[in-house]
Image (spheres, helix red, strand yellow):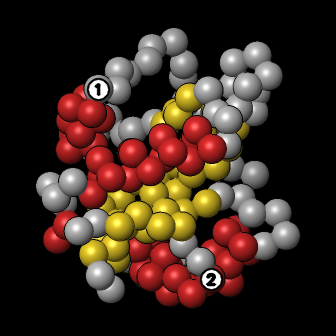
């Protein structure tokens, strides 16, 4: 049975490991993330994000990272899903759907008006999942990135 819970500092190593798996999935280096940087981002004075972990007993099946954006519509807040990743051995077992339901709860508790995210066009499994989940792609926005 899949259980979704918020990551704690005790989960730093597995979060770092999954970040390496995410990088490898997108063709990068599979080296685990830096736990000091992760600790600061998730549990520091000004946390940059929150992480949910999917577990089946002691096994961690996946990871969802999110933050809040303001303003969304007017003066409302939105939950922004930055990353949803299910480990290969756990795919097609309802883990991504469990994450989406947990994100709805997190958004509702925070008073968010919506959940937003992006997906890579070259990630057909993600696009198919979101379509099957009932999400509709939005036109009208162009994504930008600027390196400092």
Q: Earlier in the sequence, mark 2 or mark 1?
A: 2
Image check: 30 left or right of 43?
Answer: left
Write the residue at 52% across / 82% down: 11
Residue 12 can be seen, yes or no: yes
**Quarter of the image where one finds residue 108:** top right
Write the residue at 20% across / 44% down: 125
Q: Which mark is residue 9?
A: 2
Name the residue beneath numbered marker 1: 134
Judging depth in this view, the residue of 117 and 20 nearest the camera is 117
- Percent position of residue 61, x then y: 30, 71
Write the residue at 23% across / 68% down: 1
Residue 21 can be seen, yes or no: no
Write the residue at 63% across / 75% down: 38
**Quarter of the image where one finds residue 48:** bottom right
Image check: 76 left or right of 31?
Answer: right
Dot 1 falls on a residue whose secondary structure is loop
């Amino acid at each position: 049975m899949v259980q979704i819970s918020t990551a704690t500092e005790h989960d730093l190593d597995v979060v770092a490991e999954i970040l390496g798996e995410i990088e490898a999935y997108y063709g990068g280096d599979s080296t685990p993330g830096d736990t000091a940087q992760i600790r600061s981002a998730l549990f520091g004075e000004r946390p940059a994000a929150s992480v949910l972990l999917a577990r089946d007993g002691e096994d961690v099946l996946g990871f969802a990272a999110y933050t809040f954006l303001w303003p969304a519509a007017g003066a409302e807040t939105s939950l922004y899903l930055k990353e949803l990743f299910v480990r290969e051995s756990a795919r097609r077992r309802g883990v991504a759907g469990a994450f989406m339901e947990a994100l709805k709860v997190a958004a509702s508790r925070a008073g968010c008006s919506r959940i937003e995210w992006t997906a890579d066009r070259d990630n057909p499994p993600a696009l198919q999942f979101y379509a099957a989940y009932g999400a509709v792609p939005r036109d009208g926005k162009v994504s930008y990135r600027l390196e400092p």
